[in-house]
Structures are given as C-alpha cells and as structure tokens.
Amino acid sequence: VHYHWRCIEIDAENSRRVLERHNYISPADSDEQAKAKLAEKFKCSTEDVCNTCPLEIVFPSNHKARFYLKWLDCKEQTKKNFYAGKGNKFNMDLNDFLKESYERSDV
C-alpha cells in the first residue's frame, strides 16, 4: 500500500530531488534556471507557464516535472489546487486500519 499525505512544500522539495536525480535540473540551479529547463522539456516558454503550456509531453517522472514547474510558476494557484484535493475522498476504513496497525507496531 502506498499511502501518504504531505504538505505542498515537502512535495515540492521531493519533486525537485527526483528531477535532480534524472539530471533534468541541477542542485545548483536557481528557481528561474530550473523553471527554464523544465519549461524547455515541455516545449514551452517560461512566461505564464500555468496558463499557456499544456504540459502534455511524456517522459520519466513527467508528473513530478509538471508539478514542480507549476510550483515555480504559479505557487498560490498550485497551493490552492493541491489543498482542494480535486474531489478526492479519503477511505476512512483504510485510515482506521492504518492507524490501528501503526498503534500495534509502535511506529
């Protein structure tokens, strides 16, 4: 079972690390440099990426690149969408099961 809920800042940092491991961006890149490199992978301009780029090109970990590029370009809108949940619903039975399992195993 893959189950987690993180704050957006941790998701953004984890996404950046993945993109660095793929050598899409460098750990030394500024946010603007990372944005330019990722926009180029999607064949987009760096101007208003969130509203002008379809972000449809597929490559390994493109979902991380798409998320991180949005984080760099339109942080407030990305936060709003992230925390809105996009209609996702929690499986309370699974939540209860995991809570009980964690309590039994002292995790």
Image (tube, rainbow, N blue to C red):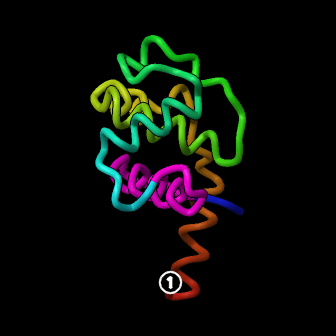
Which image quadrant for residue 72?
top left
Which x, y percent locates residue 107? 50, 83
- Residue 71 shown left or right of residue 30 in the figure: right
Which image quadrant for residue 23?
bottom right
Magenta highlight on residue 21: yes
- Residue 48 shown left or right of residue 56 in the figure: left
- Residue 57 shown left or right of residue 11 in the figure: right
Dominant SS type (magenta): helix
Assign the N terminus to one quadrant of the image: bottom right
Which x, y percent locates residue 67? 49, 38
Please, is residue 46 above or below residue 51 in the view? below
Residue at the image position 54 percent from the left and 68 percent from the top: 99
Residue at the image position 49 percent from the left and 30 percent from the top: 39
- Which residue appears farthest toward the top when viewing the image? 52
Instruction: Give the residue type at disc 1.
Output: Val
Residue at the image position 32 percent from the left and 26 percent from the top: 74
Magenta highlight on residue 19: yes
Q: Which residue is label 1 attached to?
A: 107
Residue range (magenta): 4-25
Residue at the image position 31 percent from the left and 38 percent from the top: 32
